[in-house]
Amino acid sequence: MNHSFIIAGGGTGGHVTPALALGEALRRVDQRVLFLGSKRGLETKLVPDAGFELVALDSSQVMGRGVFGRIGGALAILRAAFGARRAIKQHGAEAVISVGGYAAMPAMLAAVVSRVPIALIEPNAIPGRVNRLSARFARLVFPGFEIAATRLGAEDRSHLLGVPLRQALVEAFASGGARRTLAPPFRLLVFGGSQGARQINEAMMAAAPGLASLDIEVFHAAGEADRARVADAYEKAGVTAEVVVFERNLPARYQWADIAICRSGALTIAELALAGMPSLLVPYPFAADNHQAANADELEKIGAARRLEGLDDATRGGERIVTTLRDIFAAPGELSAMGNAARSVAYPNAAQDIVMKCMELVEAGPSHAAAGGAAS
């Protein structure tokens, strides 16, 4: 049966990517989809590029601003909520799926007023502010980590199905072939996002002389600003390394590598799990509510990763990297055990499974959905 859904949210890639994954999954089963986002986020480019219709509202961030900025942001959200309500009505939306971010707030307000059932996607161990505000009204909650459902007070409505990743990425991992034998020379993958990560780059440059004492090869996506300096540091230390600005075929690099050093955003965590990749995680220190640290802690608890701290001091951070890698490489079976632990929390079918649950909610009928939302 054909139903009508709205996917709300955006701003950053961490919100837009799961939104697009869900849109693709809905489209594969012939459901109608409309995206609601802001005029300022990545969704303004990525959503139309993927072939979806976007209603861009004049939403604005509230937190992290001065008093007048917060007031202005709150007023912008209230105005945008009227536009969101109009879009819900015109689209005939039977459910609103929120991927979070400030761009989702107008749609959440409109859905509550319109009594349209809400489903929340929360990929991080510490939920975002918009999802925390919206959770009591949600009929379904899909956390990336079990602890997030507890923090939202939504254990009774929670389904741990994983973080939605785009189908092309899932297929790329699936077609990557078997991992190489875990034996020297060990292969280290280092990356920090599309722009690189200065903190990681500095620590790796400090680590380079120590890495030379390990039997290791490095592939490092350093970003434009630091690529030349990082490459020079490896060369002077005598470390076999390939340094690039950005790696577009990350699934292939995951297949190449034995271990990764990277940030711990929710999408990166989901990719590491899908690849069965051991990792040393360096949380972005300025992430909202320090959620990347919480994500790293969850992966460390199951033995899939180690969280690296103290990298704000490059020299100490470099020493920590070398010591940690040396310990892991010296322990027989350590890399294999970490990889298996990472793979145990992989959810390659997350987008499809979440869509099926949302369709079940809609097909249960408006009275059931409304009652569930009111009860929450």
Image: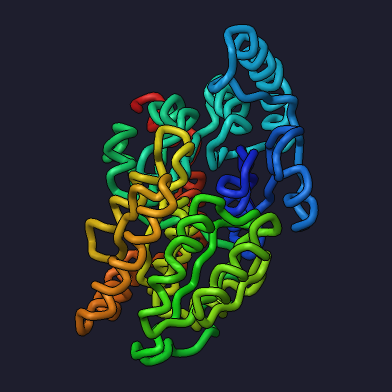
Which residue appears farthest toward the front when viewing the image? 236
Does residue 214 appear left or right of residue 171 in this picture?
Answer: left
Above/below status of 280 relative to 363: below
Residue 190 % position (x, y):
50, 67
Above/below status of 233 relative to 60: below
Does residue 175 appear left or right of residue 179 in this picture?
Answer: right
Name which residue lies at 47% across and 51% down.
265
Above/below status of 111 relative to 335: above
Image quarter in which the C terminus is found: top left
Query: What is the quadrant of residue 15 in the picture?
Result: top right
Name which residue lies at 29% across and 75% down.
340
Does residue 67 appear left or right of residue 284 in this picture?
Answer: right
Residue 76 % position (x, y):
69, 17
Name which residue lies at 44% across and 52% down.
314
Image quarter in which the N terminus is found: bottom right
Look at the image and tell me whether residue 31 can be seen. Answer: yes
Residue 264 % position (x, y):
43, 53
Residue 359 % position (x, y):
51, 51
The residue closer to the viewer here, 112 or 372, is 112
Q: How is the image coloured?
A: rainbow
The residue closer to the viewer here, 228 or 199, is 228
Query: What is the quadrant of residue 8 in the picture?
Result: top right
Look at the image and tell me whether residue 29 can be seen. Answer: no
Number of marks drawn: 0
The residue closer to the viewer here, 198 or 319, is 319
Name which residue lies at 36% across and 45% down.
293
